[in-house]
Amino acid sequence: MVHKRKAVSPEISVTSKVSGSGKTVKTSSFPIIAIGGSAGSFPAFEKFFSQMPIDSGMAIVVVMHLDPSHKSELTEVMRRFTPLPVIEATDGMLVAANHVYIIPSNKDMGIHSRKLLLMKASKPQGIRQPIDYFFQSLANDQWNRAVAVVLSGMGSDGETGIRMIKENLGLTIAQDPETADYPSMPSAAIDTNLIDYVLAPEEIPLKIIQYLNHPAIAEETGEDTKMSLKTTNAMQKILMFLRSQTGNDFSLYKKSTIARRIDRRLALFQFTDYGQYADYLQDNPDEIDTLFGELLIGVTKFFRDAAAFDSLKTLIKDKLKADNGKDKFRVWIAGCSTGEEAYSVAIIIKEVIKELDLKVPPDLQIYATDLDPIALEHARSGRYRGNIVSEVSEQRLENFFTKEEEGYRVKKNLREIVVFAQQNLIKDPPFIKLDLLCCRNMLIYFTPELQKKVIPLFCYALNPAGLMFMGPAETIGGFSEMFKPADPKWKIFKRLEGSVMLSNMIEFPSHPAKQNHEKTKDEIVAPVQKKGVREIFTQALIDKILPASVLVNEKGDILYNNGNTSKFLELPRGENMINNILRLAREELRYPLTMLMQEALKTDKAVTAEVVKFNLDDQLRLVTIKAAAIKDGGEHHLLLISFEDLGLQSHNVKLAKSAASSVDIAAEELKKELIYTKQQLSSTVEGMENSIEKLRLSNEELQSANEELQSTNEESLTTKEEMQSLNEELMTVNSQYHLKAEELTRLNNDMKNLLEATEVSTLFLDNDLNILRYTPQVRILFNLIASDIGRPISHVVSNFEEPINEHDIREVIDKLAIKVSDIRTKDNEWYRVRIMPYRTLDNYISGAVLTLTLITDFKQMQSKLDMLENYAHTLTDGLSDAIIRFSDTLEVLDFNAATLKILGVKHNELKNQNGAAFFKKLWKSDEPAKLMQSAIANHSVKEATISIKNPVQTKFLLTATPFFGDINTTPIVVLKIGADV
C-alpha cells in the first residue's frame, strides 16, 4: 500500500558558489535523489516509496546492479511500489520532478544539466561500479541539490560517490545495516564517516524533505552576502571552540566555505541559527570533532582526473631524464587525505623509473601530510575497498596491490616510500628541496590573503624547475614571476629559477586572530600568571640552551621532539610521532646512532659517539651524538638522544689543530667508519648465528607451503570474485522471482475467490482428461474429494443420467471449438455444459475447462412457452380468417390453415417468404406491406380494405397488429386477412 502524503515542495532555484571553488553554480529548480541498491533492496525500495509523497517536488533516479544478459524488469517492479510515473531512462532524457527514472541493464549512466546520459558499460559485470559512477556525475552536476541514498546490497559500490556528494555539499544517507538483508553496501558507506543519516528505509523520505526545506539549505545565499552581527559573533565562537579543542585555526579559511559546512549541520539538526548551534557545540565536544572533520573533507580517489596524471607522468619522465644522475627525487603531497593521491603519484614515478631503465635510479622520497589524523591513519594502513577496481587498472592492481578479503592493500615496496605525517600548513615548516609538490584542491578553501602567503612558501620548498601540481579550479594568482605553466589545462606549473627574493614572503602568524590588535598590560601578564614563571623559565632553558634532542622508546619510535632536529632528521616537529628515528636519520648518522642506542640500552648509561661527519646541502658538517637511557617508571626504557652541531668541517678550529695533515684526517675518519662497521657486523652476526639454522630449515618448509598457498589463494580469489558477482546477480534475480511469486499468489487467491463467488461449477482438465482443479460447487455433480486431483474424469462417478461425452471434450482440445450441451441429473435438474479449450499465457492448449450452469428454471420456462405456443396454434387454426405472423423485416414466421385457402397458395409458396415481395407478386399491391410497416412504426393497430381481382373482383379486410417485447427483442406484426367483405 502506497501512502500518499502531502509535503512542502523543496522546489527552489538557487545560485550559489560551492565548496570554496569560486565557481558559481545555478542549481536546478528541484533536488535529485539518487538511490543505489543491489541484492535484497526491493523490500527497502517498497518501504521507501510507501512514505514518499506524490508531490514532493523531487526527482528520483534508481541505480541497481542488473544482470546484463537478461531484460530488466526493474521498471515494472518499481511501478508496483509507487503511483509516481516510473520510466526506464533513455539517452538524453530530461529529468522532471515527481518522476522516477530507472537505469537500463548493461549501461553506465551519468547526468549533465539534468539530462540523463547513457554509455555502454566500460567494465565487465562484477568490476563495474554503476552506483559510484552516477553518484559522482550527480555531485558534479547538481552540487548541494544532490541527495545520495545507499540501500541493501553486496560489495562497496557507492562509497566513492558518497565522498563526491559530500564534498559538493550534498546530502548522504545510508540504510541502517540492521534493517538491510545484505548490509555490506550501506556499511561501506557508513565506514567513510561521511554519512549524514543512518535510517530505516521508511524514515528516509521525511528526513530528506526536512533537510531540503530548512532555510539554511533552501534559502542559501551567495558568497558576498554579509552576515548579521549576531551571526558573526556566533561564527567567532564556533571558530574559537574549534581552535581550543583541535588546535587548528580556521580564521584564514574562506568564511563562505565554513558557513556552508555549518549550514549543513544546522539543517541536519534542524537548528534555527548559528547561536543555537554554538550553544550545542559548547555542550557537545563530539560535535566539534565532527565539524572539524566536515571542514577537512578531502574527497579523493586513485588517479583522480586520469588525463591530468598522464600529463604529470610525461613531465616527470622529462624531468628525470634531465636530472639523470641525481641521487634523490623528493615529493611532498600537501593535503593527502586518505592517501589515494600519494600512492597514485608514487605509482607513476615508479613506473617512470622502470620505463627509463636508469643505471642509477634516484632514491624516491615521498612525504604526505594532512591535518586530519583519522584520514592519516587510513592512509598509513594502505587498505582500500574493492571498488578501487574502477579507478586502478588491472596491471597496476597486480603490480602495486595485494588482494585481501575486504578489498586491496598497498604492497610493501610502495608503502615504504611514502611517509605520512600530520602537519598544519599555516604554522608548521614546509619540506624543502622538492622536485614535485602536489597541492590539489586545497588552496580553494583558503582566503586570497592566505593564498598569497602559501604560494611563495611552495616556491621556496621547490627546487628550481620543480613541478607543482594543482587542482583544476586553482591558480597561481599573480605569482607568474615564480612559476610558469607546464600544462595549463591541468594546472601543472614549473618553478622558475631564482628570480624572486622570498625572505619576506614566508612568515605566518601563529594566531592570526590576534593580528592588528594592540595588547593591553593585562593581556601580556595573563599568560604568565596562567602558566607560572618557573614553567616558562624551564621551557626557555630547554629551547635556548639544550641541544636538539629526541625522546625515543626501545624500538626507536619517536615520542617527543625538542629543538631543531631537521639537520639530522627529516622530521616535522610535534608529539606522538610514530616515525622511527633510525629510518628518518640521515644516511651517514644511521650506523653510529644504531650503535649508540644498543650500547646505552645494554649498559644503562649515557654514551657519546665521537665526532661524526655528514653531508647537508652539499656541505660537510660535524656533529656529536649522545644517548642516555631513562627509566619510564616501569619495565620499559626510554632513550634521550641529543645532537650537538659542531658546524662546517672547514670552520672547525679544534679539529683543524689536532690533525697533522689532511691525509691523517682522512685516515682517522676511515678508521672510525671501519670501527662502526665492525661493531655493527659483530652485533648482527652474534644475533643471527643462534637462529640462522632454524630459520633455514623453517624457510624451506614455509617456502614450499607458501607457494602452494599462494597458488590456492589466487584460485580462491578468482573463484570468489566470480561467485560474488554471480551471487549478486542471483540475489537480484531471486528478488524479482520472489516478487513474481507474491504476485502469482495474489492472482491465485483472486482467481480462487472469483470462482467461489460466481457459484459456477467449473472443472479443469489436462490434455489427458485428468482432473487439475475444480470449484466447490462441482462436488454437487461429481463425487469428488481432494485426492481425486490427477485422476481421469472417467473414473469419477457423476450425478447425471448419462456421463459427459469424453469424445466432445477431446474434440474441443483438438479442434479448438466450443461445445455446448444440456444434460439432466438423476434428481431431474438440468445443467448446461460448456466445454472450452484451456489456453496458457503463451497461447498453448493444455487441456479443457468445463462450466456447468444450472438451467432447471430455464428449462421449465421453455416448456411452458412451448405449451402456450401450441395452444395459440390450435386457436388460430380454428379461425376462418387468415392469420400470418411476420418479423419486423416482414419475413413470414408462421401462418394458420385458413391462410392457404383464402390466398389460394400452397404451403411452400408462403413459407419463409418476404411479405412485401409475396403480396406484390400475388396481388400486385404494396398496400399489405405498407400497412404492416405503419403499424410497427406507430405502435398501433392499422386496418385497410383492399380489392383484388383473383380472377373475379374480391375485397379483403386487412388488420395489422404489432407486438413489442423488451428493448432486447425485435417486434413482430400479425396480419389478419378477412374473407369477402
Image (tube, grey):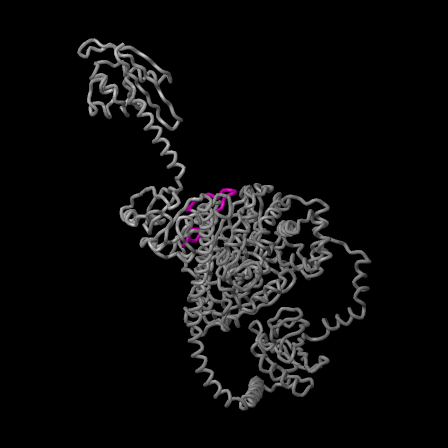
Q: Is residue 468 left or right of residue 218?
A: left
Task: Label the magenta part by its dominant secondary structure.
Answer: loop
Give the percent coordinates (x, y) of residue 521. Answer: 82, 58
- Give whichever of 878, 331 is nearer the camera: 878
Give the percent coordinates (x, y) of residue 712. Answer: 43, 75
- Give whichever of 740, 500 is nearer the camera: 740
Q: Is residue 774 left or right of residue 240?
A: left
Q: Is residue 786 visible?
A: yes
**Span of residues in magenta:** 90-109
Quadrant of residue 457 within the rendered picture:
bottom right
- Give whichever of 909, 341 is nearer the camera: 909
State whether residue 120 is above or below residue 531.
above
State whether residue 612 is above or below residue 227.
below
Q: Residue at x 63, y 62 (%)?
A: 424
Q: Is residue 455 visible?
A: no
Give the percent coordinates (x, y) of residue 494. Answer: 50, 59
Number of marks in the image? 0
Give the percent coordinates (x, y) of residue 261. Answer: 63, 52
Q: Is residue 103 magenta?
A: yes
Q: Is residue 838 magenta?
A: no
Quadrant of residue 292 within the rendered picture:
bottom right
Q: Name the quadrant of the C terminus.
A: top left
- As drawn, which residue projects farthest toward the front? 878
Q: Residue at x 47, y 67 (%)?
A: 347
Q: Residue at x 34, y 17 (%)?
A: 935
- Give whichever of 620, 322 is nearer the camera: 322
